[in-house]
Amino acid sequence: MNAAIRAVVRQADALGHEAWGIRRGYQGLLDGDLAPLSSRAVANILQRGGTMLQTARCLDFHKPETRIRAAGILQEAGIEALVVIGGDGSFRGAETLMREHGVACAGIPGTIDNDLPGTERTLGFDTALNTAVEAIDRIRDTASSHGRVFLVEVMGRSSGMLAVHTALACGAEAVLYPESHEDGYNTLVARLKAHWEAGKRSSIVVVAEGDMVGRAMAVGEQLKRDHGLDLRVVVLGHVQRGGSPTALDRIWGSRWGAEAVRRLDRGERGFYMAEVAGALVAQPLSKVLDPQPVPPGDLGALVSILSR
Ligand code: F6P
């Protein structure tokens, strides 16, 4: 996200606009927590995790009267366009602000879940994925030395995107995720049994936190109860949401930030930046109003084929 902020500020500067930073998202806007951001003010942030502008959940933004207040604050500050970095909730807020009050809005996808429609990438996903894979590579050493099963829970409240990509990249034996059509628990037991019979003495099971079977702790308890397995549960949690961003996240944050400003400068409104088949494109903000689930494709099935 810092790469995107830096790019927005510096591209705006290059086009002769003044950029302002709003701290803590919509909540900060309502609190009037905004100030000009110079090109110098965004120095040395490209390699940092999190966001220099900080963030907050703002449930109040669902109320029409709150949005009237927000539009008034923007107008009073002379702000002509808003670049929103976030996930579907933030984008829905931007879309409504634009539709109701004519605020020119642009979105930059930022969520480790990679679950926005119309884009194959969101900022943070690649970093979170690499962090999870590195952690599981380390866990694998204990799993194989001790001949144990590990359940590793990764984030993804309602999406298995991070889980299936992590599972594929670390050669997991199985993956449980919300969009799977399999009967999670029973399929998992059958798979672990088949692996044991085929001579595998250790397994890594990646569990998406949003999986319907339950979080990794619950699945682990059930496996211990039903089968007496010597297993361990690791919840990676917020470790995945921090740390220095990968080169890919920095590059896409920079490209999207700059392109969003160029488009706003040309008079375009109501779009969000996206990646489709490797190309940088823009999608209409209204696309987030009718979200199609972003399925992780057949990657879950590939995890089982490759773990035999
Ligand atoms: O929506 C993004 C996400 O990373 C989810 O995967 C996760 O459940 C959630 O945020 C965690 O949010 P919080 O930091 O508020 O607990």
Image (tube, rainbow, N blue to C red):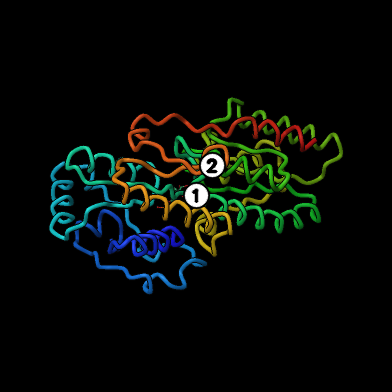
* C-alpha gap between disc 1 and disc 2: 20 Å
Q: Position of residue 259 (x, y in %)?
A: 42, 51
Is the residue indicated by label 1 positioned so its CB lies within 8 Å of ligand 1? yes
Numbered disc 1: secondary structure? loop
Which comes before the other along the chain, label 1 or label 2? 1
* Type of amino acid at the residue the image marks with label 1: Ile
Residue 244 in the figure: left or right of residue 23: right
* Type of amino acid at the residue the image marks with label 2: Ala
Say which residue label 1 marks.
112
Tell me the residue at 47%/57% (across/down): 254
Observer-nearest residue: 209 or 256? 256
Circle 1 packing at 10 Å, graded few (<14), some (14-19), many (20+), is many
Question: Quadrant location of residue 77?
Answer: bottom left
Say which residue label 2 marks.
279
Tell me the residue at 62%/40% (across/down): 164
Observer-nearest residue: 125 or 98? 98
Circle 2 packing at 10 Å, graded few (<14), some (14-19), many (20+), is few
